[in-house]
Image: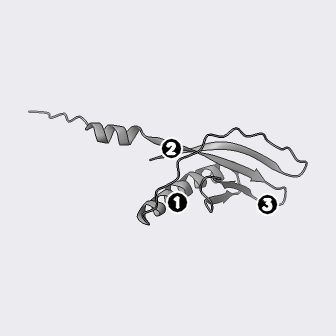
Amino acid sequence: MRVWLTTPSRLETRQAMRKLRYLVRINRNPDSDWGASVPDLPGCVATGKIIHIALRRIQLAIQLHLRGLQEDGVRPPKPRQRTVLPRPTSRQIDFYATGEVAA
């Protein structure tokens, strides 16, 4: 029996390793569910009753948003590096995370 091993091409390897990390704003008002949005991708939003659902949904939303831009022939914006200074308020939880998607 012969076993053939194939190695991925350089292009396949580079594509598999290339990831984009977008800044994700996560917030919650006391009277609502968790919300997530991506400042670099206007209109890319998601919600969830619990935070990990909102985070999972925003990651899918980022992938769909980028795919839609590519299908429309629009070059997706590169993620911008940012420093974020949180502004605590008494009624709202507001913080930032990153969402990673395959490029």
Disc 3 packing (10 Å; few <14; some 14–19; many ≥20):
few
The way the protein has been coloured in the rendering is one colour
Rounded to the nearest angstrom, the CA distance separating label 3 from label 2 is 29 Å
Residue at far bottom of view:
72
Where residue 48 appears, as percent x and y from the top left, is 68, 57
Residue in view at x 56 percent, y 51 percent = 59
Mark 2 belongs to which amino acid?
A: Leu
SS of the residue under disc 3: loop
Rendered view: 32 above or below 84: below
Residue 17 falls in image quadrant: top left
Residue 20: which numbered mark, if any? Answer: 2
Where residue 81 appears, as percent x and y from the top left, is 61, 40
Residue in view at x 79 percent, y 60 percent = 32
Residue in view at x 73 percent, y 40 percent = 84
Write down the residue under mark 3.
32
SS of the residue under disc 1: helix
Mark 1 belongs to which amino acid?
A: His
Q: Earlier in the sequence, mark 1 or mark 3?
A: 3
Where residue 22 appears, as percent x and y from the top left, is 58, 46
Of 14 and 73, the residue lying toward us = 73
Residue at far left of view:
1
Where residue 21 appears, as percent x and y from the top left, is 55, 43
Mark 3 belongs to which amino acid?
A: Ser
Please name which of the two marks, 1 or 3, marks the residue nearer to the observer: 1
Q: Earlier in the sequence, mark 3 or mark 2?
A: 2
Residue 58 falls in image quadrant: bottom right
Write down the residue under mark 1.
65
Disc 1 packing (10 Å; few <14; some 14–19; many ≥20):
some
Rounded to the nearest angstrom, the CA distance separating label 1 from label 3 is 24 Å
Residue 73: which numbered mark, if any? Answer: none
Q: Are marks 3 and 2 in contact (CB under 8 Å)?
A: no
Which quadrant would the N terminus be assigned to in this image? Answer: top left
